[in-house]
Amino acid sequence: MANIVVKKLERTPIDETPVEIVERKGIGHPDSICDGIAESVSVALCKMYKEKLGVVLHHNTDQVELVGGYAYPKLGGGCMINPIYVLLSGRATAEVLDKETGKIVKLPVNTTAVNAAREYLKKALRNIDLEKDVVVDCRIGQGSVDLVEVFDRKRSEIPHANDTSFGVGHAPLSTTEKIVLETEKLLNSAELKAIVPGVGEDIKVMGLREGKKITLTIAMAVVDKYADSLEEYEKVKEMAHKKVVENAQKYLNGHELEVFINTADDEECIFLTVTGTSAEMGDDGSVGRGNRANGLITPFRPMSMEATSGKNPINHIGKIYNILSNIIASDVAELEEVKECQIRILSQIGKPITEPKILSIEVIPENGFTLDDVTKKATEVAEKWLDNIQNVTEKIVEGKVTTF
Amino acid sequence: MANIVVKKLERTPIDETPVEIVERKGIGHPDSICDGIAESVSVALCKMYKEKLGVVLHHNTDQVELVGGYAYPKLGGGCMINPIYVLLSGRATAEVLDKETGKIVKLPVNTTAVNAAREYLKKALRNIDLEKDVVVDCRIGQGSVDLVEVFDRKRSEIPHANDTSFGVGHAPLSTTEKIVLETEKLLNSAELKAIVPGVGEDIKVMGLREGKKITLTIAMAVVDKYADSLEEYEKVKEMAHKKVVENAQKYLNGHELEVFINTADDEECIFLTVTGTSAEMGDDGSVGRGNRANGLITPFRPMSMEATSGKNPINHIGKIYNILSNIIASDVAELEEVKECQIRILSQIGKPITEPKILSIEVIPENGFTLDDVTKKATEVAEKWLDNIQNVTEKIVEGKVTTF
Amino acid sequence: MANIVVKKLERTPIDETPVEIVERKGIGHPDSICDGIAESVSVALCKMYKEKLGVVLHHNTDQVELVGGYAYPKLGGGCMINPIYVLLSGRATAEVLDKETGKIVKLPVNTTAVNAAREYLKKALRNIDLEKDVVVDCRIGQGSVDLVEVFDRKRSEIPHANDTSFGVGHAPLSTTEKIVLETEKLLNSAELKAIVPGVGEDIKVMGLREGKKITLTIAMAVVDKYADSLEEYEKVKEMAHKKVVENAQKYLNGHELEVFINTADDEECIFLTVTGTSAEMGDDGSVGRGNRANGLITPFRPMSMEATSGKNPINHIGKIYNILSNIIASDVAELEEVKECQIRILSQIGKPITEPKILSIEVIPENGFTLDDVTKKATEVAEKWLDNIQNVTEKIVEGKVTTF
Amino acid sequence: MANIVVKKLERTPIDETPVEIVERKGIGHPDSICDGIAESVSVALCKMYKEKLGVVLHHNTDQVELVGGYAYPKLGGGCMINPIYVLLSGRATAEVLDKETGKIVKLPVNTTAVNAAREYLKKALRNIDLEKDVVVDCRIGQGSVDLVEVFDRKRSEIPHANDTSFGVGHAPLSTTEKIVLETEKLLNSAELKAIVPGVGEDIKVMGLREGKKITLTIAMAVVDKYADSLEEYEKVKEMAHKKVVENAQKYLNGHELEVFINTADDEECIFLTVTGTSAEMGDDGSVGRGNRANGLITPFRPMSMEATSGKNPINHIGKIYNILSNIIASDVAELEEVKECQIRILSQIGKPITEPKILSIEVIPENGFTLDDVTKKATEVAEKWLDNIQNVTEKIVEGKVTTF
């Protein structure tokens, strides 16, 4: 039986605190590119393993290093000089023993990984030319033999935790969090790109709330071929600004809003790119250094250091419990008795992942409710999800869970 | 004038909370190896720039990817099969215009970086053979031209913040934090290695406090050539266990302690290594995914996602403000009126680093004191450090500040 | 005035010698793949330089290393496990000083090179999937500064020889040479692939002539997806065999012919591939280790060790004089007075390429003619080509000269 | 029984021909560096295999790509900016099945290779700092499974030829050949370096003989830290010149000699290096593009295109027959009846290496002798060596045979 504890969250409701900082690195930010590649590679490997063997084998492809290229953006359209270099690493089971033939069978881990990375890049960065602007290299290795065997042996049972680690999650999102998240989503939406194609994918949104005032500072790459002049560059910024402000109204909830886009622009330096990402020009990236599993960086909230993207969805606690914490938090927060909720799940290495050492639910009850009103319902929510943990895994395997 | 705000920290003193999780990845952990290399490279570049030009030029070498090797550890001494691959990336100014001659001068960025990485590895991992067990490769690139020029122009003045970002810090360490930190330091001390040479450098200490009980779960690599048999392997663990328990007494402060070392060991699988680090066998690492600037991962405290190691110490907010927050927190916590203290510093891109947008000091006053008793003194501490910020930079340049 | 010497070639006409060995590595052989990439990259750089600056700048991209992949060919269709890794290196001018603005302009050398390599691979290997089966990496560097300046200065004049080196050529091809060359061309022709799509591009033809008997030993990759069974594999070989024998009749000239395809085949091992090249399975390749400039390896003839592919066509003697030697030999051999002809051109470093130190023409006159009958005409042929050397360069720049 | 044929060599004795060109790339030339590394790696693997398993397993490490670095040589001592990058590739058996345990055993191929390469570089290039000036990377792969098995099966018997290929050799060396060879040896001898330490290892000697006049054109790197001024640079050249002329007297045999060192030097450009090799500054190298197995490039003699260095010494015809041809030629040339001798050995794939398809001995008898006088003795020499072919292999395994 899982050790589920429900407690009072000892702090002021987040929207009522004096200061809050929230950040989101958009999908074209070099760190997010790495997160996206890492997760795509993992999803592709899951698919390959299932096709070849019927089960997902051990892998952690949460190591992607992006070395920035060199570009000459130019109003009207420049070019890339040196390609971006992407190194896929991590480890994945590449050999299995076919018990019938007694032969070692090698699995197409590296070709699958390279393919997944390239497909992801095409999808995520509209304006990059994969035939010349990016080199995708691969040094994914075999894991330690013993780990592979452990993994293999347990395939029919509930997987056991790979480590002593933990996940955290919270819900609902604060006003600032919602606005930051939705702003990036808007700017990277197909709808907006159709209207303002000059908006690149490398978008960093920093939200600062002081009391009731929210300030969004947005660094937004502009794609050079869609801006023939400084005027057009400014127009791209203005149109984006207008859309952001419009869109934020839905979430403002009585807060005041100020939006700055590319505040560092001056005569000599504007955020102009050939490809829509600063990765083209020396900005490097890695997995796990950007958004947490909920898509945000929230230094005023508890966070896990674990990279979620690219980890295997079978027994990697750093991945599963972070995702699960957010899911449980979300469901608990929907209870009418709950105002805010924060989840922490701590694993015990070697124990079934359905049996965490502690699953702690901290809540701020809604006005008029007490902790006692919540305890039973919240516990049930948690129990239900622990019982259904393999559905979570299944969804991750299918690429239906966002991890950054 | 800096915007310094002193407020009450709205939470129970950390040692009195019901649960606390603290982790430290030791210097031989693949992520820490990357942090250590990144910072060594930055320190070496600072030195090279100063020797050649008198000033530190722009660089961020916070991108190191370690791709694990393949090893055959064996009781009594095994060997490595595939070397560990270390890719240095990031960017650094490699060309400057010599105004007298009108010629571009290239600077030995890459040879300096490779050298620093190799020297660091030799120092950090006693049992690795740099002539065969590690490949250090380098793809550090030139940064964007505009950034370089900005940097150059401002060299005599107070540097301006490179980004809208923030740092966080706290003091004093909680009992659990202190024990976790000191346990790893002990196990990686020259003194202990002299007595128990079998203890490798890859040591992960996970501390869990439940009420008054602290449990340390330690994953500790054992170096195979120092353990001829399973008995000797066990003896290394026992001796380490004894030393850890002994050492922890100094910090226990009335808590109960339980220590587990290599709990996942079973007949088929022990944590035996050729080199003292799991990097030898498929465990990969990157910068900024392990310890925060204070050497710990503290999910129950506010944390910054910024990688501190390898960032330039001149104007990189993610580095300077994280280090500065810890320094200020430490000094504020030494005031007799203060029980606990938490610092957050938020930058304004383009403004002098001595003028953060907000420097927030949150304190829990000691019993018998109020916030008012603290405000003035704490503010003075913060002001003094903001005025002396370039001393902090100086110390980082000299390699005297730990960043992970 | 060039130092042109016409002499008697002191040997038996080649077709009358007792033994002759001739080899050709087909376009899908790993060494030829590298030659092809190297030359494509050079041609693409020439084009890029001309578009950007109006002149071809210094480059030598005759360094391509192909590291074989790992494949699982299977009758009916297998897959690649590890991609082929192609490293482009060599050097090319990547920075020029724009005298008007006084700024350094960077040129898209590396993106152009990656693009050219990928385009070439697509064209040369019908059955390879560039999205997963090959990684094209690039480490082309800037050449030494001084060389670049020399090059730049001379752009309007006749280029000066880059080295003390030489080229060799001969004509006409011997019977064996012709058959070897035409056999590979046939097997890699669009016409044949249309009829026998199972024939891969990796084809090595070794011709041995003993007296009047020619033996062709052909190693020919078969593409697995076009051969569902061993019978079909054998049928591919049979059809190829039939076509080769048929085609050779045109060149046999009274010789007897025997053709062996994949003689090493046995029950356990056939030359089956996923992609049509052995590069998929551990066979590595480099530039300049296969065919000479005339498409053949002829150990019974003088040969130059110089890699022709990838060298710059402006002043690289190893390239220009090898190609020129073959062109001059070909024209001299067409004189009715000439039976066989062999050309050697030796450069003088730093002198105009139109002024070789020696251009030696060795001939075997046709029956009934003497050396004196040839001397003047042959000298005129050589003079004409030296005068028109820049037309040769032009053709190379346009990618119209085969170099391997 | 081997098919040994003795024939008359139909040409003028080499020293009496009108023109001869001979070249040697010294040990510090980028191509020779690659040859040396390739052979060192092979020798080290042979040793490792014998230690671990008692037999040499399949490998061909004849693929080394050297990507030149970037250096700032300066009179008095400069520095390297970008390290030289050396990529080891090729293939080697890295896994064997231990029949007793039924487990796959991995062999330390890559660590052994990296180690051998670094050790060789230290030995070959006195002035390079391996800790910063060179990156040695390794992508050596497993060969195709089938080849490995073939190899394994045959280990106790006479190895069978891996390919249809051939080797060529000749003896004695011509006067020009001897002088070219000995000149490079002198300039790279410990004795000369002791007297003129400024002489680098990158030395290319081009010998041109016209009638009785030999011209040596030498490109010789000078190490900057041993030349504080242009005068000292010139002095290094002068001392080298003097020694070369002195040394050549022993071999001149009535020829006239002229020696040029660094003829391309001018005010702006001298051949100054930090490390003694042009590899420091963009000059790339590969295996098999320089000296043939006898240490020379001799375009007026038959040559094999095969890279000898790095090939396995057990069954690789391209290696064994080239070395054997030179050995047999040397012994045949010592017969008093023989003036000059040329050997060609052609293999039959799959047949024992002691049974070549043809071993052809072509001789120019000494004055007063006929072919008949030579045939029997020469045949005996060849038979003796074929019988002792495994001694040749043994010597190669022990690193006692020079291959370039």
Image (cartoon, coloured by chain):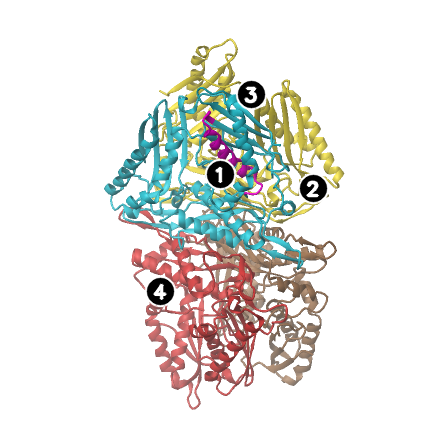
Chain colours: A red, B brown, C cyan, D yellow
Magenta stretch, residue numbers:
C313-340
The answer to whether residue D400 shows anywhere in this view is no
Q: Secondary structure at mark 4?
A: helix
Label 2 – label 3 distance at C-alpha: 41 Å
Q: Which mark is residue A397?
A: 4
**Residue B371 image point, x, y percent:** 63, 84
Label 3 – label 1 distance at C-alpha: 29 Å
Residue C334 figure quarter: top left
Q: Amino acid at mark 2?
A: Asp
Q: Secondary structure at mark 1?
A: loop
**Residue B7 image point, x, y percent:** 61, 82
Label 2 – label 1 distance at C-alpha: 32 Å
Label 1 – label 4 distance at C-alpha: 47 Å
Same subunit: marks 3 and 1? no
Residue on which disc 1 sits: C288
**Residue B272 image point, x, y percent:** 46, 52
Q: Between tags 1 and 4, which lies in front?
A: 1
Label 4 – label 2 distance at C-alpha: 60 Å
Q: Secondary structure at mark 3?
A: loop
Q: Between tags 2 and 1, which lies in front?
A: 1
Q: Between tags 4 and 3, which lies in front?
A: 3
Same subunit: marks 4 and 3? no
Residue D150 figure quarter: top left
Q: Amino acid at mark 1?
A: Gly
Q: Earlier in the sequence, mark 2 or mark 3?
A: 3
Say few, some or many: other residues with alpha carbon within 10 Å of mark 4 (under 14 / 14 to 19 / 20 or more). many
